Amino acid sequence: MSQALTFARPYARAAFSTAREENQLAAWSAALGFSAQVAADPKVASLLLNPTLTQEQAVALLSPQGASASQSRFLTVLAEARRLPLLPEIAGLFDQLKAEAERVVRAKVTSASALPEGELEVIKAALARRFGREVEVETAVDASLIGGAVIDAGDVVIDGSLRGKLDRLQTALAS
C-alpha cells in the first residue's frame, strides 16, 4: 500500500496542478473518482493488466462521459507508464490536496447509535473551531462502541467512546 502511494503521489500532484490551473478542481475530482471506481473493480483491474488491451481502449474504458481533453491526456500518460491500477490511490491523494487547498477538514464521526442532527452540528462547530477550517462530516454507526463516539479527522483521532474508555481503564489497571 505504501509503495502504491509513493508511486501515485507525483501523478496526484500533477493532476491537482493541472486542475488548479484550469480552475476545475471539482470536475477533476469527479472524473478521477469515476476512473478510480472503475479501475478498482476486480474484473477491470485484471483487464488493465492484460497486454492485449491497448492504451486507447484502457483510456476509453476509464474516461467518464464528457471528460476534458486534459483529463483524457492524464489517463493516457498513466496508461503509457502502466500506472492505471494506481487510479484509486491517485484519486484519494488528489482529494486530500483539494481539501487542503479549499481549507476543508473531512471528519468521520462513528457513534454507538445514530446521532441527532443537533448533536452533529455541535460536533461540527467544535471541530471547525479547533481546526480553524470548514468541516465536512461523514457519520457511521458502530454498536460495539457501547456509547459515545470516535471522531477521525485525518491526523487527529478523538476517542470519546465508552469502549475506548474501558480499554484505557483496563490498560491503566494492568500496569
Image (cartoon, helix red, strand yellow):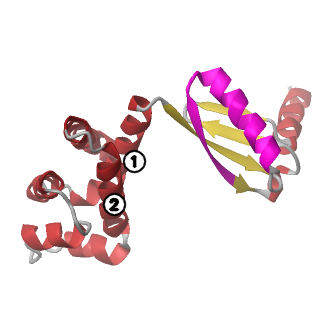
Instruction: Using the rendered view, name the quadrant where residue 129 is placed.
Output: top right
Q: Residue at x 75, y 43 (%)?
A: 120
Locate residue 167 relative to residue 75 in the image: left or right: right
Amino acid marked by disc 2: Ala
Residue 144 percent coordinates (x, y): 81, 55
Q: Residue at x 26, y 60 (%)?
A: 85
Residue 6 percent coordinates (x, y): 29, 39
Locate residue 41 relative to residue 75 in the image: left or right: right
Q: Magenta span has 132?
A: yes
Q: Nearer the viewer, residue 175 or 128?
A: 128
Depicted 140 relative to depicted 18: above or below? below
Amino acid marked by disc 1: Gly
Residue extending farthest right:
173
Q: In this figure, which residue is indicated by the disc labeled 2? A: 36
- Asked if disc 2 and disc 1 are in contact, CB closer than 8 Å, the reply is yes
Q: Residue at x 34, y 63 (%)?
A: 34
Secondary element at tag 1: helix
Q: In this figure, which residue is indicated by the disc labeled 1? A: 92
Residue 145 in sight from this viewpoint: yes
Depicted 121 relative to depicted 44: above or below? above
Q: Which range of residues does the magenta coloring cover?
A: 117-139
Q: Residues within 10 Å of mark 1 (few under 14, many from 20)?
A: some
